[in-house]
Image (cartoon, rainbow, N blue to C red):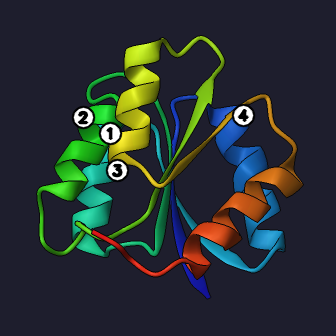
Amino acid sequence: MRRVLLVDDEPVLRSVVRQFLEFSGYEVVEAADGRHALSLARERPPEIVLTDLLMPNIDGLDFCRALRSHAETRDVPVIFVTARNADALQRAEMARLGDGFIMKPFEPDDLLMIIDKTLARPVDR
């Protein structure tokens, strides 16, 4: 079973996404902020990360930078799940650091498609 680390400070969104991904055959580990997510990722690296951009403690961009700075998590694909209000600088950083993004609100099937496509790609870091 493929392991997804889901990072978002909205408990309802995490619950809905977790249920959908588990139904789709994924193992899901949740974190409400980047600090907790970093701890979980270092403890047992996931196969892919879904992270919100705006969160308390460590935001999605800083979380992704921290993932990329450690050998054991450097190549873990990161998909940003964010609201449409991301500015141009944030979008540029998401493109540079991450492996894709999807805007909230989204259709669950669209999220699943981007996860599957991302996991099918070879690592190019």
**Residue identified by numbered label 1:** 34
Q: Which residue is drawn at the image coordinates 32% and 39% (left, top)?
A: 34
Q: Residues within 10 Å of mark 3 (few under 14, many from 20)?
A: many
Q: Could you say where residue 68 lies in the image, as x and y percent from the top left?
A: 21, 56
**Amino acid on which the number 4 mark rests in the picture:** Val
**Amino acid on which the number 3 mark rests in the picture:** Ala
**Amino acid on which the number 2 mark rests in the picture:** Asp
Q: Nearer the viewer, residue 76 or 87?
A: 87
Q: Could you say where residue 85 lies in the image, as x and y percent from the top left?
A: 59, 11
**Residue identified by numbered label 3:** 37
Q: Residues within 10 Å of mark 1 (few under 14, many from 20)?
A: many
**Residue identified by numbered label 2:** 62
Q: Could you say where residue 70 lies in the image, as x and y percent from the top left?
A: 12, 63
Quarter holding the C terminus is: bottom left
Where disc 1 sits, the SS reads helix
Where disc 3 sits, the SS reads helix
